[in-house]
Image: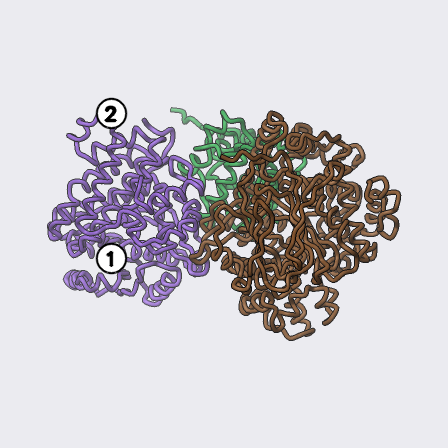
Amino acid sequence: MKAIVVFPGNHLIKRVVVKVSFFILGRALQSASMFDPTIRKELSPWEDGYTIKMEVLPKGPVMGWRKHKGTLKYVGGSISNANLEIRFKNLTSAFLLMTPQVGVAQGFAENRMSVKGDLSHSIVFVRILNVVISYLYPDFIANRLLKEIPPLPYRKYYRRAYLYLIGIPFGK
Amino acid sequence: MRENTITGTSNRILEVDLERRSFDIITISLEDRKLYLGAKGLGLRLLHERLSPGIDPLSPENIIIFMPGVMMGTGFPCSNRFHAISKSPLTGIITTSSCGGPFGLHLKTGGWDGLILKGASAEPVWLEVTAEGIRFHDGHAYWGMNTGEFQRAMDLVGAGEVVIGPAGERLVRIANIRSGHRFLGRGGLGAVLGSKKVKAIIARGGSYKIVPSRPSLFQKTKDRALRYINSNEITSYLYRRYGTRANVLLNNNAEILPVRNFKRGSDHRAYKISGEEIRERFFVSPSPCAKCAIRCGQKGLFGGKMLQVPEYETTALLGSNLEIFAPEVIARWNHLAAELGLDTISLGNILGWYMEAGEKGLLPCEIGFGEERGIDRVIEDIGQGRGIGGELGRGVRYLSDKYGGKGFAMHIKGMEMPGYDPRGSFGQALSYAVANRGACHLSAFLVAMDVYFRFLNPKSAWAKARYVRFFESLTAVINSLQVCQFTMFAYVLESPLARYTPQVLLGLFMENFPILAIPLIDFGLYRDMWRAVTGIKISRGDFLRAGDRIVVLERVLNCREGISSSEDTLPPRIMEETEKNIPLQSMLKEYYHLRGYDEKGVPTPSTLKNLKIT
Amino acid sequence: MLPSYYEFFSPVKIISGKRAIDNLPHELEELQAKKPLIITDKGIVLTGAIDLVKSLFKEYHREIPVIYDDTPPDSSTSVVMEITDIYKNAGCDSIVAIGGGSVIDTAKGVNILVSEGEKDLMKFAGANILKNPLNPLVVIPTTSGTGSEVTLVAMIYNEEKGVKMAFSSPYLLPRVAILDPRMTISLPPPLTASTAMDALTHAIEAYICIQKNPLSDAYATAAIELIRKNLFSALQDGKDQKARLALANAATMAGVAFSNSMVGMVHSLGHAVGGVCRLPHGIAMSIFLPYGMHYNLEAREEELARLLLYLGGDEEYVRTPKEQRAERSIEMVLEMRDKLHTICGIPRSLKEAGVKEELLPTIARYAIDDPSILFNPREMDFDTALSILKNAHRGEL
């Protein structure tokens, strides 16, 4: 009987999608931390130079942020050890979270990520992500990802437009 | 049932002679009302007519005027502010000060549109304002009490007071006047009342109802005002939730927070004294001025006692400026200063100077940056004017003249600097330099333009003079209506043009085309509220010109006391210890030109003629 | 309804019953553990349990293991390091933890350091950081209880930062848990009640939090039923071995449940109060449980309705109309609390527990940063947390 050989699938597309969405998320968070008072407030107790890293195991895309003067600056892939590290167990997990199919809390519940660092900081980070997600996605998508949409009454649609037109492309 | 109503203004002002214990009732002509509007503007006009130049501010020749505006008592949002105008014993020039306490409301609803105090009483008195006039009471029993004690000792139900503390009584140059839990803070006005031996003035209101001249316009404008206030992020979210302390993190991130006697602009510990942190730790609840729609006032539980949460300025100057990052400590000092009757901005600056002078060995000093030990005692001494406190209470200009250390004495024209470092906002730098009462952030709050909204480039001089001029005049109008300055955030920014234009575009437009942008700034709501309450028609141009007039009149009064361009400066630390030099002279030149001053900064005769200042 | 994806892991061998501890030496041999270190505290020594264990080893012809009995009531990093040194110097190769939650957490912390050969515990702070199995760990719980004998978390106080750090990893799970009624017989009524409420909270929260799955649900509901049926018997007669064993089982089952489905806001609030005012964990759970159920009612009405079957019994379940079942569950818990208050004085509000009102904002701050809030069905922000705390202070729902 012939043995059936299973070829490894082509993960290139998934990898590219994750890389691009890392970039978008990175820039979006950088921009939102400049104009959103909720994010600014969550960041205030952390010292300058605090780093957060998101990485896909084993050799996947990596990206991170560094706190600088009250905002989070996106530092792309050039980040080694960080104060808080969130590691996706595999490319699929990262893919599911980054293309918004699985929410952040849901992702943790399904054991898709591991966290290195102080877990209470990770909760603060999740709150910040919730705010960014509700800026990035219209309500009907965000509702599936988040337990509750954080209250953002001020100029939300205008800020969302700003993020897409200026924040993400130009990093402001 | 109160039948008596007042429309806009009762036009009855009490002019009191403290020596003779008599009073007159004077009125304002319609012309003057249209030219000067009320509150600050009218107060300056009345002072101009009465005050002779060159007198000693602590002598009986000084005059102090309390004036609410036409908006007081109408129930319009954020209308509960009144003004006091006098010559300052701290700076030697005119000081105007604004307060949200209950005195203004009761003065107006008692039927009076203003109160002028001349001369001085031989013995300590307290004054009662009734519907008929002024009654004099013996003040000996109350002399020496601190402000809180006095408030508890008197029956203040249905009344509003202004009262001075021991600092005012001892003629401490940075003494303030208290009304309710708010203050006429700057310039040492407490000492002026103290020199007149007036412990307090209590007004019993409620005799009159203030009604607008055009009720339907009034209601429409009020609805619009409330809508704007509730949809603006600063007034309805940041200030309402965190008080003025919302500025701590904003300033820290922009590096304009005063740290260590203005040596630095930020500190990583600043979040500990931020509004956000205080709200989450100290059981904060609202404690606003009456009829306020913004509600930035807060009180909280500090060390088991319910105290007013310190305002931003206090938090910065008595906190980060002294490298103290414990809100309980700052709240305690705030309370102490309130009871003694001391201006916390000047106090913080004096303590900062004192600590640095001590470090540099200029005079013996037992307190230091970052340590709370010993400071309570020093504040007490300043309040009572005893020991080294007697010297310290005279302000940093006096101290640096006597002991040296001018390089780090943070004052302009003798008035100590508020909690915004101008090296991070050149617009504010110009605003400080030309502000009529000295280093004042409320004269034209350019930090909003430069830093908070990032409409303008903070480290550039371009167009700043135009904006300083405009906002000075607009603020002068707002202070003469009078409503709270914080409404500017909402009324100007929530108008459709400002609201829907993307911030980047708006910023580019405002920065590069100020001549086009400034006329488009919509302050129509202020004009509408004036028309609705007084029924007096006034064009947009005339309205703004009234603001120009008020600012220039104040400048005229100051020039009479010897002010010129050589006093329009910034402290040496700001000019020298900076990364990027502030091009002050070029900004001043442009500003003088816009205002119609000559190169010495004195208003020219043709300017005075154009503005009808006689 | 099956979740679209879940993970469940419970490899702990559970030995439960009369004289179960007698099996300890044999179990250690099966694990190839030649030189165990026994971690316990002075309270346990006083009950005579350690003497019992020593005699077992003698009987089994094994040398008396090394004993550390100085564990303080709150595990901390310095204690963990101290014990690590003792372990290394004595050449131990396994740990037996005999005690309550803090002893077990300390033992887990020590196990990390000795197995990885490291000195800095903070390197491993977080979730799913450990990469290798740890040395054998056997746990004999003496309270019923935290369920730590079957959970993959350990909370250890970091003295430097002044906060409790969370460590979570499947490798932290003990190999064997031994439930012997002799260990909990001497537990006084207040402790019995508060630890039972801790177990009840674990079970209820495990049933409603977002990581729930059919396996954890089975353990959770079984635990609730056992507690309902046996708690008051154990309170009436402390020496009732059957009741004690049932409660021990309930605690362990609740532990398995929440180890796999996590807990929620009741634990966030409880940890925060514990951190700020040192309120004992079980009492905090008892106070906050109804508030947690009530707040999550909106999102989990069906589940809370189902719980009535276990909280109230089948008669109560059938008797109550469908729409009212969820609220009846909350009422059942409230009734249970009232009875406990009458019998042994367990506080029902923060005020009764002596928590000062002015600390509430600080507690709210810590509560919203607690890792367990992530798994709560609903979001909890500062204002919500503060208002719940205020209600809990007054004792109103």
Q: Mark 2 falls within which chain? A: C
Instruction: Report the residue at 49% width, 48% height from top.
Output: B279
Q: Position of residue B443 (x, y in %)?
A: 71, 47
Which quadrant holds residue C48?
A: bottom left
Q: Position of residue B517 (x, y in %)?
A: 76, 33
Tell me, yes or no, whether dots 2 and 1 are on the same chain: yes
Element assignment for label 2: helix
Chain with purple colouring: C
Circle nearer the N terminus (2, 1): 1
Which residue, given by chain and number where applicable, does mark 2 sit on?
C322
Which quadrant holds residue B612?
A: top right
Instruction: Say which of marks 2 and 1 sits in front.
Output: 2
Label 2 Cα neighbours within 10 Å, binned few <14 / some 14-19 / many ≥20: few
Chain with brown colouring: B
Which quadrant holds residue B234?
A: top right
Q: Position of residue A115 (x, y in %)?
A: 46, 45
Q: Are marks 2 and 1 in contact (CB under 8 Å)?
A: no
Element assignment for label 1: strand
A112 or A141: nearer the viewer: A141
Q: Which mark is residue C98?
A: 1
In the rendered image, the quadrant that contains the C terminus of chain B is: top right
Task: Tell me: C294 left or right of B354.
Answer: left
Q: Is any atom of residue B523 visible in this view?
A: yes
